[in-house]
């Protein structure tokens, strides 16, 4: 990426930024997936052409979904959300019929030394816990509940 004129972002090791005058392009690289956006269609095409000369790649067109994040184009920009990802977690946990509440934690409960019965499927439990942890990266308002 650096040989194509991109610089690495200090905030994220997988984000690369191209700046020339008023032109700017952002490239997010995750394993073998690339998300690319630019300040103009011409710049976007130039970057894609340069990448295709260096790498075998397929252009999948407009971004709709990436790593659990849904991307919707709006007149004011892009709306990023994880509604589908959150609903999928609820479905996996068999909690789609649950009623919402301000916090699912009883703040008055006293913890006991009795650990109770172990979970039936520890792997499924760890998978759900990891999915919830990933969800709070985009939704910090859910952090306390998770």
Image: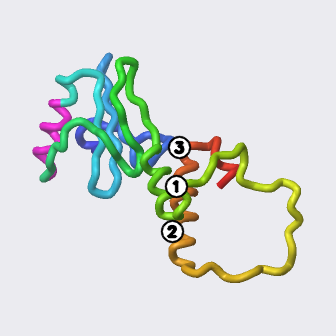
In whole angstroms, how far apart are the C-alphas of marks 2 and 3?
Answer: 18 Å
Residue 91: give x, y in percent of width and height.
47, 59
Q: Mark 1 points at which residue?
A: 96
| Residue found at x 20% / y 24% | 41
* Label disc, if present, on residue 127 of the rendered structure: 2
In whole angstroms, how far apart are the C-alphas of marks 1 and 2?
Answer: 17 Å
Residue 109: give x, y in percent of width and height.
86, 61
Screen quadrant of the N terminus: top left
User: Callout 2: few (<14), some (14-19), or many (20+) C-alpha neighbours within 10 Å?
Assistant: few
User: Callout 3: few (<14), some (14-19), or many (20+) C-alpha neighbours within 10 Å?
Assistant: some
Residue 59: give x, y in percent of width and height.
16, 43
Q: Is 44 in front, or is 62?
A: 62
* SS at badge 1: loop
Screen quadrant of the C terminus: bottom right
* 40 magenta-colored: no
* SS at badge 2: helix
Q: Is 6 in front, or is 59?
A: 59
Q: Which of marks 3 and 1 is in front?
A: 1
N-terminal of the two: label 1 or label 2?
1
Q: Is the magenta stretch mostly helix, strand or loop?
A: helix
Q: Name the residue under label 3.
A: 138
Q: Which residues make up the magenta segment?
A: 45-55
């Amino acid at each position: 990426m650096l040989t194509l004129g991109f610089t690495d972002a200090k905030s994220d090791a997988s984000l690369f930024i191209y700046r020339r005058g008023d032109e700017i392009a952002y490239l997010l690289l995750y394993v073998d997936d690339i998300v690319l956006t630019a300040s103009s269609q011409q710049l976007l095409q130039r970057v894609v052409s340069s990448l295709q000369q260096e790498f075998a790649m397929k252009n999948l067109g407009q971004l709709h979904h990436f790593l659990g994040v849904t991307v919707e184009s709006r007149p004011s920009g892009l709306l990023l959300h994880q509604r589908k990802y959150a609903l999928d977690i609820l479905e996996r946990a068999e909690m789609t019929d649950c009623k919402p509440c301000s916090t699912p934690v009883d703040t008055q409960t006293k913890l006991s030394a009795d650990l109770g019965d172990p979970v039936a499927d520890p792997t499924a439990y760890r998978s759900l816990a990891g999915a919830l942890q990933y969800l709070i990266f985009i939704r910090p308002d859910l952090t306390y509940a998770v």
